[in-house]
Image (cartoon, rainbow, N blue to C red):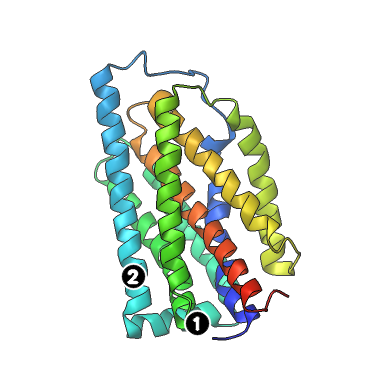
Amino acid sequence: MSGSGDLERPFLRRQSSVQLRQQHKSHWRVPSKARLGGVDRASERAGFVRKVYGILASQLLVTCAVCAAGMYVSPLRQVLVCIAFMPSSRWFQAAWAVPTFVAMLVAERSKTSYPCNYVALSVFTLLMSFNLALLCAGFYECGIGVLILIAAGVTAVLFGLLSAYAIASGRSFSCMGAYLSAALPLLCAWGFARCFFGIGGWVLYPVLGALMFCGYIVFDTWRIMEVFGCDDYMAAAIELYMDILNLFLHILEILLKILLILIGKDN
C-alpha cells in the first residue's frame, strides 16, 4: 500500500459532484407552494413517489455495477488507476464535470420530452458512475477496497433511517432549506481549497460534509412527499442520487482518515 498522500489523492478529486450539487438551483429555495400533496390526488402522489424511487434505484444499480467493474475487472481497473493518478487528473476531473452538469440540466429541464429526458438521465448517471469508479479503482489498487464496501453499507443504512424518519415524522422540514443553502457554498469553497491548495480541515471537513448531506436527504425526502409537482420526478431522483453519492464520499473519507490514524500515517 502506498503512502498517505497517494491514498488521499483519489478522494480529493471527487469534488466535482459536490460542485454539481451547488449549481443545482432547486437547493437554494423551497418552492412557494409549500404543500402540493393536498392539491394532487393521493394516487398521483403515490405514483410520483414510486417513479422517483424507481428511477433512483436504477441509477444506483448502474453506479454500483460500473464501480464494481472498475474494482474487479483488472484491465479496466488499470486504465482507471492510470487516469486517477496521472499528474493532470484534477484538470481532467474538472473538464469531466462539464458534460456531466449539462446532462443533468437537460434531464431536469426536459422532464416532459420523452425519450430525451431518459437519454439525458442515462448519460448523466453513466458519467457520474465513471467518476466514482475512478475512486473505487484507486482504493482497490491500494489494497483498501474494503473501505468502499463499508462506506456503501453505512450510507445505505443512514439513507434508509433518514428517509423513514422524514416520511414517518409528519413534520415540515422547510426550515432546513435556508441553513442547507447557506452551508453548501461554504463546503464547496472549502473542498475546492483543499483539493487545489492543500488547505486543512483534515477530519472536520468530511464530518461536516456527511452531516450536511444527511440533512439534505431528510429535506429532499420531505420535498418529494410534499412539495414537488408530479412532473418533477427527474429532478427529485437526481437530487436524492446526488445526496447519496456525496454522503458516501464523505463517509469514505472519514473511514480513510481513521485507517491512516490507525496505521500511524495521520500527517
Label 2 secondary element:
helix
Q: Is residue 130 left or right of residue 199?
A: left
Q: Which mark is residue 151?
A: none
Residue 27 x/y as whole percent: 55, 37
Quick one: 194 or 232, which is closer to the camera? 194
Circle 1 — which element?
Answer: loop
Q: CA distance from mark 2 to mark 1?
A: 16 Å
Q: Residue at x 40, y 35 (%)?
A: 164
Residue lying furthest front: 262
Q: Residues within 10 Å of mark 2 (few under 14, many from 20)?
A: some
Residue 81 image point, x, y percent: 47, 81
**Quadrant occupied by the N terminus:** bottom right
- State if disc 1 and disc 2 touch (CB < 8 Å): no
Q: Residue at x 40, y 51 (%)?
A: 156
Give the quarter of the image for residue 149: bottom left
Q: Nearer the viewer, residue 143 or 83?
A: 143
Number of dots carrying numbers: 2
Type of amino acid at the residue the image marks with label 1 = Cys
Q: Compared with residue 186, is residue 163 higher up or lower down, i.e. above or below?
A: above
Residue type indicated by callout 2: Ala
**Disc with the residue nearer the chain's start (2 vs 1):** 2
Query: Is residue 265 visible to the viewer in this orientation of the structure?
Result: yes
Q: Position of residue 266 (x, y in %)?
A: 69, 74
Instruction: Kindly identify which residue carries mark 2.
Output: 68
Can residue 109 be seen at all in this image of the molecule? Answer: no
Horizontal and vertical percent position of residue 39: 35, 13
Q: In the displayed structure, does residue 193 sit left or right of residue 178?
A: right
Q: Can you say which quadrant of the picture contains the C terminus?
A: bottom right
Q: Nearer the viewer, residue 105 or 18?
A: 18
In this rendering, the answer to whether 32 lies above or below 148 is above
Crowd around label 1: few <14 · some 14–19 · many ≥20 (10 Å) = some
**Residue at numbered disc 1:** 142
